Image: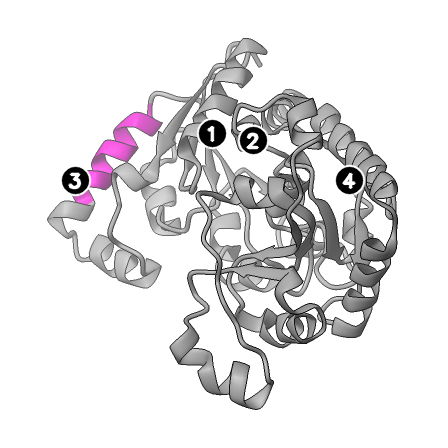
């Protein structure tokens, strides 16, 4: 593997943290470089629009693609992390000199319909979603659709999420938020509203998408919930202040990087899809599970945790934190996987 060169193409809200992980990969002997796609195709959000512009030979898009093609041509293996902006047609026509790894990051339904074309123009596929449904393997499902090798690849944690804090500083951090949720309400809306009605101001929901005026009728008038969105500098700050945090995934999972972000910041995680969690965690030791979109089960699990002693929660926090930091750093997981393949 030391003779191969790798290019890691990504779009991510923590680009500096990902670059740090790639530098850590290089210390392990992996010849890998990052390319932040946001620097070259920024401002084009609709993938269908991008596909049209590419087919129409739009000057701006073609200039960006020509640069990306030239950079990719310098490397033996190109890893495309999550983005749909390098269209399947472009990959087939422009990146044929390199081996392609497509890393699907979204939920199973999106993976099946949005990223399946990418699978057919790749040499290998990673998915960070273990399940297709409550108990069906997504890897097995995708493998039935293609002869391309498919691997389950958990995201792991980015060391930058620790905000330069030592282990003890994270574990002893003041926990002044009893329960938190970070993310779009989307299809989780009823689940979160049920929890809000039960826990009131003890539950802090952080979301740019949950606009109060837009949801006034549904939240307050219909459900009796006065919703508010507290402010915070970043997700890590929220998680380090959280005693417990809710993780919710779409259809299968858990697929979100939040699954590792929460414990590395010391928050106790209550997450759906128990069978998927078992791929990386021990239930009721490293993570606590509830049935997907079952608000009664989630409320029961949150109640149980809040009813436990502070000492018990501190020990659970420590177990989860050490388990993740010792076994699931992004750079280690990626280096190990590439070492096995190449």
Q: Which mark is residue 17?
A: 1
Q: Which mark is residue 264?
A: none
Which mark is first along the chain, 3 or 1?
1
Query: From mark 3 to mark 2, how far is it between C-alphas?
Result: 32 Å
Q: Is residue 4 above or below residue 111?
A: above
Labels 1, 4: front one = 1
Query: From mark 4 to mark 3, how far is it between C-alphas?
Result: 42 Å
Residue 308, position in %: x, y? 88, 51
Q: Secondary structure at mark 1?
A: helix
255, 200: nearer the viewer: 200
* Mark 3 nearby-residue class (10 Å; few <14, some 14–19, many ≥20): few
Q: Which residue is mark 3?
A: 63
Mark 1 vs 4: CB contact within 8 A: no
Labels 3, 2: front one = 2
Q: Is residue 11 left or right of residue 194?
A: left
Q: Which residue is mark 2?
A: 158
Quadrant for the N terminus in the image = top right
Mark 1 vs 2: CB contact within 8 A: yes
Question: From which residue to which does the magenta span run?
Answer: 62-73
């Amino acid at each position: 593997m030391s003779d191969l060169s790798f290019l890691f193409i990504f779009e991510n809200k923590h680009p500096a943290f990902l670059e740090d992980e790639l530098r850590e990969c290089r210390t392990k002997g992996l010849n890998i470089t990052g390319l932040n796609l946001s620097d070259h195709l920024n401002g084009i959000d609709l993938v269908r629009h991008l596909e049209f512009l590419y087919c129409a030979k739009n000057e701006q898009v073609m200039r960006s693609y020509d640069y990306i093609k030239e950079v990719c041509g310098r490397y033996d293996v190109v890893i495309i992390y999550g983005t749909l902006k390098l269209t399947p047609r472009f990959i087939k026509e422009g990146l044929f000199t390199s081996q392609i790894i497509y890393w699907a990051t979204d939920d199973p339904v999106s993976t099946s319909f949005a990223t399946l074309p990418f699978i057919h123009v790749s040499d290998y596929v990673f998915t960070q979603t273990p399940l297709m449904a409550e108990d069906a393997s997504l890897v097995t499902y995708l493998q039935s659709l293609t002869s391309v090798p498919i691997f389950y690849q958990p995201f792991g944690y980015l060391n930058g999420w620790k905000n330069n804090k030592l282990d003890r500083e994270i574990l002893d951090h003041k926990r002044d938020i009893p329960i938190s949720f970070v993310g779009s309400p989307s299809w989780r809306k009823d689940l979160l509203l049920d929890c809000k009605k039960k826990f009131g101001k003890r539950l802090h929901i952080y979301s740019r998408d949950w606009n109060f005026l837009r949801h006034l009728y549904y939240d307050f008038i219909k459900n009796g919930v006065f919703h508010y969105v507290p402010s915070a500098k970043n997700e890590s700050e929220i998680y380090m202040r959280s005693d417990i945090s809710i993780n919710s995934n779409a259809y299968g999972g858990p697929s979100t990087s939040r699954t590792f972000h929460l414990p590395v910041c010391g928050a106790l995680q209550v997450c759906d899809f128990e069978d998927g969690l078992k791929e990386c965690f021990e239930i009721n030791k490293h993570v606590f599970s509830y049935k997907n979109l079952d608000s009664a089960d989630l409320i029961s699990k949150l109640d149980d945790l809040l009813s436990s002693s502070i000492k018990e929660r501190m020990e659970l926090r420590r177990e989860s934190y050490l388990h993740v930091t010792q076994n699931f750093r992004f750079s280690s997981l990626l280096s190990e996987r590439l070492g096995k393949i190449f």
